[in-house]
Image (cartoon, grey):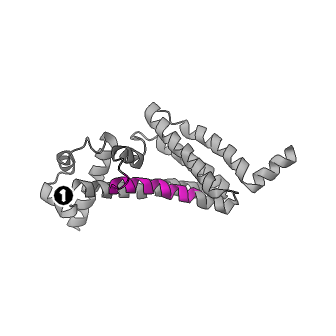
């Protein structure tokens, strides 16, 4: 029990500091001081700082995806509504006091080498979110779910970046509005409605 709690404590401190201050700007000593532990304890759980970064990113990824996809499923009663609720969940996240952008996007920028395990974990975060959106588009009968999911992810990532850099949480609502237009052009029910009106 002691071993597990120490590892979790190190991870939580690493996530908080890496996310807030940047990965390369945060030294091991800073993490150890925050966690109230020693180097031998750290290296009993992680072989290197890189291993700690990968573990921290993976944990953050799981928690962030669980929140976003969980809120989407909870708030929407159809695939289309769930996609739009995904953007509502972004708005909730953007409004949190400690919002500092997407940890995985930030990490991918800090570690641009595509062969780096850190970069690969970051990219997988994006891939998993896009796969979630594609699954909903499949359920909704979208004509081109792969391409439409990629378009929606551009909106998601653009909203995250703008909200972070400009401190504007309403970027999620703007992205949601644009997502509506994309869905209206792709989902069969919406296409029929437009045809009847025209």
Give how far across and how far down residue 112 sits, in percent. Answer: 36, 47
Residue 109 falls in image quadrant: top left
As drawn, is 77 to the left or to the right of 68? right
Looking at the rendering, in which quadrant would you find the N terminus?
A: bottom left
Vertical arrangement, residue 98 with respect to residue 135, above or below: above
Give how far across and how far down residue 197 sits, in percent. Answer: 86, 44
Say which residue appears at 33% left-offset and 55% top-offset.
116
Question: What residue span does the magenta drawing correspond to?
Answer: 114-133
Give how far across and how far down residue 89 sits, in percent. Answer: 53, 48
Whether residue 176 is visible here, answered yes or no, is: yes
Say which residue appears at 28% left-offset and 59% top-offset.
8
Give how far across and how far down residue 4 sits, in percent. Answer: 25, 65
Nearer the observer, 98 or 20: 20
Q: Residue furthest top?
A: 166
Say which residue appears at 55% left-offset and 36% top-offset.
170
Query: Which type of secondary structure does the marked residue at label 1 adopt?
Result: helix
As drawn, is 12 to the left or to the right of 137? left
Say which residue appears at 67% left-offset and 54% top-offset.
80
- Per the image, the residue denoted by label 1 is 42
Check residue 27 for magenta coloring: no
Check residue 126 for magenta coloring: yes
């Amino acid at each position: 029990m002691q071993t597990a709690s120490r590892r979790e404590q190190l991870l939580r401190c690493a996530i908080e500091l890496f996310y807030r201050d940047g990965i390369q700007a945060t030294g091991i000593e800073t993490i150890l001081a925050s966690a109230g532990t020693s180097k031998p304890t750290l290296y009993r759980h992680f072989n290197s700082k890189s291993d700690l970064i990968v573990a921290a990113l993976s944990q953050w990824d799981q928690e962030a995806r669980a929140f976003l996809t969980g809120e989407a499923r909870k708030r929407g009663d159809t695939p289309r509504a769930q996609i739009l609720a995904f953007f509502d969940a972004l708005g909730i996240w953007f409004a949190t006091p400690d919002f500092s952008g997407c940890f995985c996007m930030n990490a991918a920028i800090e570690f641009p080498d595509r062969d780096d395990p850190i970069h690969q974990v970051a990219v997988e975060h994006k891939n998993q979110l896009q796969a979630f959106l594609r699954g909903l588009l499949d359920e909704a009968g979208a004509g081109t779910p792969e391409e439409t999911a990629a378009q929606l992810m551009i909106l998601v990532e653009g909203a995250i970046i703008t909200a972070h850099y400009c401190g504007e949480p309403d970027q999620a609502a703007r992205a949601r509005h644009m997502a509506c237009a994309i869905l209206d052009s792709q989902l069969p029910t919406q296409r029929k409605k437009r045809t009847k009106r025209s």
